[in-house]
Amino acid sequence: MNDEYRSIIKQFLSGPHAEALEWLGEGGGSGRRLGEHQSIGQSVALVERLYGLGAQKVIAVELHESPDGSGAARYLLVELPAEHREREAIFAFEREEAERRGFLGTEDEGQVYLFLDVKGIA
């Protein structure tokens, strides 16, 4: 984990952000979503999956909202548990998604947050 990574996380947390499930729910039926997920149900399922894998908190960042309450967020910050073995499933999920798109996964370097670009996550 380097200073650039810390700076990016700090930047995201200084901008518009919210706990992901709360933010999705506040939109009601207006169509808030994450990345390319076409429905609120798919977006909620992704966040719930991350919690099920052990995330302490899932934060939607760089929120884009319309006056009608709809909105989108392409990025998530996943607050990681402290215990290494409890983090493994989250990193495995991120690595699998990254490799499916032709990228390398993120290494566990003891960081507090895992940055997740949800574009294209199934």
Image (cartoon, rainbow, N blue to C red):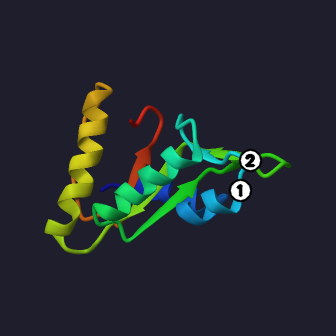
Quarter residue 15 falls in: bottom right
- Label 1, secondary structure: give it: loop
Residue occupying image coordinates x 22% and y 63%: 87
Q: Could you tell me which quadrant the N terminus lies in?
A: bottom left
Give the left or right position of residue 70, taking residue 17 as reference: right
Vertical relation: 41 (above or below) 15: above
Q: Mark 2 highlights which residue?
A: 70
Q: Nearer the viewer, residue 7 or 117?
A: 117
Residue reaching furthest to the right: 67
- Label 2, secondary structure: give it: loop
Q: Nearer the viewer, residue 100 or 37?
A: 37
Q: Tell me the amino acid under the disc marked 2.
A: Ser
Q: Nearer the viewer, residue 121 or 3?
A: 121
Task: Give residue 12's position: percent from left, percent from top.
Answer: 56, 56
Quarter residue 23 falls in: bottom right
Q: Tell me the amino acid under the disc marked 1.
A: Gly
Residue occupying image coordinates x 37% and y 71%: 56
Task: Give residue 19's position: percent from left, percent from top.
Answer: 55, 66
Give the left or right position of residue 35, taking residue 80 as reference: right
Task: Give residue 88's position: percent from left, percent from top.
Answer: 18, 58
Residue 87 appears in the figure: yes
Vertical relation: 89 (above or below) 118: below
Residue 3 appears in the figure: no
Quarter residue 90 falls in: bottom left
Label 1 with label 2: CB-CB less than 8 Å: yes
Q: Mark 1 highlights which residue?
A: 27
| Mark with earlier residue (1, 2) | 1
